[in-house]
Amino acid sequence: MTPKPFLSIEGVDMTFKRGSATTNVLKGIDLTVAKGEYISIIGHSGCGKSTLLNIVAGLTIATSGVVLLEDKVVDQPGPDRGVVFQNHSLLPWLTVYENVALAVDKVFSRTKSAAERREWVMRNLELVHMGHAKDKRPSEISGGMKQRVGIARALAMEPKILLLDEPFGALDALTRAHLQDQVMQIQNDLGTTVMMITHDVDEAVLLSDRIVMLTNGPSARIGEILDVPLARPRDRIKLATDATYLKCRQAVLKFLYERNRFVEAA
Ligand SMILES: Nc1ncnc2c1ncn2[C@@H]1O[C@H](COP(=O)(O)OP(=O)(O)OP(=O)(O)O)[C@@H](O)[C@H]1O
Ligand SMILES: [Mg+2]
């Protein structure tokens, strides 16, 4: 008997309506994700990646089809899905500590004491090496640090799945590499299930167990799913010359730039 999928996206279509204009963004998306799997969604700008992530997050309801997380229908946002957006979404008037505490207090108000919650906030900030900045406000820390706090906040809710929408997109290359390594380490240690959206081919290959490639919109579909059979932990320097790594990279590049070239929507 095959085990039941952890996350299951079944026949998801998404059509946006504005006045008389309708746009079919996603068409017939079927995807299952196993527990502990790191899955990336890649595709050209505007193809519907964020729309798909928002449907899994419960922020957008699909026009048809269903999303199941451990057999439970997803129809609203919930703490079992920790979302990190591309644009740092911290509350500017709260400190780093308070931003994480807000989520922790909400999720664990009944199950953890005040002291346990304080300790838990700090433990998650330490996980992303941000404990030292706990009393700073978002305006006082860098973009990379803000993303780390966003990741700590999502992880602190102990979600079943972490949903990352281009979490490193707005960062410079060095910070991005550093943060990718941290996320790989955390995922390795905690066994978190991750669904990540990215534009970046190297990022997708380095981090993922599987890469889901979306065709261009409108009516984007899953064009291909690529397995990334690279052992973990992964080392970006060693992989740069690894034959399997290069083969995966080539396959994604081919899909994006030969078979599904970006076409500017009219
Ligand atoms: N609320 C909405 N109402 C109408 N159209 C929308 C809405 N949200 C998204 N769209 C449209 O759906 C399409 C897909 O948008 P989406 O944000 O999912 O793309 P994306 O793949 O995440 O792009 P990017 O890589 O640029 O972030 C776009 O054409 C967009 O204009
Ligand atoms: Mg997007």
Image (cartoon, grey):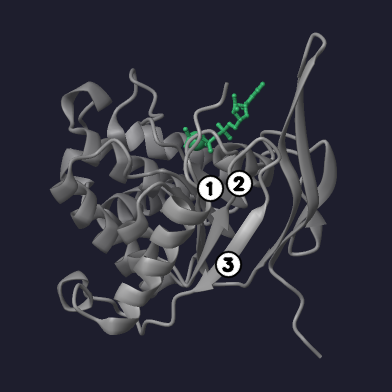
- Furthest toward the front, the residue is 258
- Foreground label between 2 and 3: 3
Amino acid type, label 1: Gly
Asked if residue 213 lies left or right of residue 2, the reply is: left
Mark 3 sits on what residue? 225
Front-most of residues 143 and 113: 143
Residue located beneath label 1 in the image:
82
For this rendering, which residue is in front, 77 or 102? 77
| The C terminus: image quadrant | top right
Q: For the point 33% across and 20% down, which residue is it?
A: 92
Q: Is mark 2 within 8 Å of ligand 2?
A: no
Residue tagged by mark 2? Answer: 79
Label 2 and label 1: CA atoms lie apart by: 6 Å
Residues packed near mark 2 inside 10 Å, few (<14), some (14 to 19) or many (20 plus): some
Q: Earlier in the sequence, mark 2 or mark 3?
A: 2
Residue 130 image position (x, y, % from top left): 22, 47
Amino acid type, mark 3: Ile
Mark 2 or mark 1, whichever is nearer to me: 1
Q: Residues within 10 Å of mark 1 (few under 14, many from 20)?
A: many
Crowd around label 3: few <14 · some 14–19 · many ≥20 (10 Å)? some
Which residue is found at the position 29% from the left and 34% from the top?
96
Where residue 204 sits: x, y (%)? 39, 60
